[in-house]
Image (cartoon, rainbow, N blue to C red):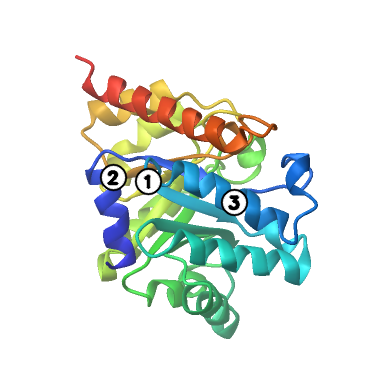
Amino acid sequence: MKSIDKFYSAVTNGKHICVGLDTDIEKIPNHLKNSDDPIFLFNKSIIDATRAEAAAYKLNFAFYEASGIEGLTSLKKTIEYIGEEIFIIADAKRGDIGSTSAMYAKSVYDYFKFDSITLHPYMGYDSVQPFLEYKDKLNFVLALTSNKSANDFETLTLSTSEKLYQKVIAKVNEWNKQFANCGIVFGATQIEQLQENIQLIKDLPILLPGVGAQGGSLEEVITLFKQHHFTPYLINASRSIIYASNGNDFAEKAAEELKKLNAEIVTLSSAQ
């Protein structure tokens, strides 16, 4: 199955929770830390417990790069263990120009075999083009993020009276016309802005971080999407799932948390 088809297969079948494997060695259960590869062992247990319910997995490169070669080895082993059936996102926030961007794309898509990546657009089209050339992949471009400092730049008003993030969304819609393999990242904490711009987003797939530990409301997001009959979205949940417990039952508690989120989505989506 093509990468982009895996995304649409999940969301069409009502799966919308992306499990963020932002695995911090300091936060995993102590009984795992004496193993040869504690990060992979933790990830493997989470994947085993959540595979049936997860729409996707997202791996944040920083949590693996921090451990050097060993961390990148854990990253690759995790991707291989997830396998080819479930959509996998590289949360790497790349965006450079020329041959540098092409090498980033080659790393993420050819070597690590991810289905998707997060990109920042602030160097313009040529910084994302090498990723778009992988026609079967799905590229999530940062529009309006969930962090408080998003206001430093993303919400600035341009001379055209547009906000900067609105200009980004408009550009991503333009880029999407070529291969239909673009999406956006829009923070779940920015619910008013999401409401105001849902028509501008059109049918671009959305990756929404910020639900749970960052304070975004699952109910508000699902209610909004239901009102607009919008289905191509993934809601990322990292800490609230993978660190639901720090004991021997950490994987079981992660599965319970994921099931709870999925059940809430079903209830909200079917509400009159």
From the image, tell me which residue sits under label 2: 11
Quadrant of res 66: bottom right
* Disc on the earlier residue, 1 or 3: 3
Q: Quadrant of the C terminus?
A: top left
From the image, tell me which residue sits under label 1: 55
Q: Secondary structure at mark 2?
A: helix
Q: Is residue 120 above or below residue 72?
A: above
In the picture, measured across the screen, residue 190 lies left or right of residue 181, that is right
Q: Secondary structure at mark 1?
A: loop
Residue type highlighted by circle 1: Ala
Residue drawn at the location 28% of the way across and 45% of the way down: 11
Which of the numbered marks, if any, corresponds to residue 175?
A: none
Residue drawn at the location 47% of the way across and 23% of the way down: 217
Residue type highlighted by circle 3: Asn
Residue 163 visible within the image: no
Cβ atoms under marks 1 and 2 closer than 8 Å: yes
> Where residue 106 appears, x then y in whole percent?
51, 80
- Cα separation, mark 1 vs mark 2, equals 7 Å
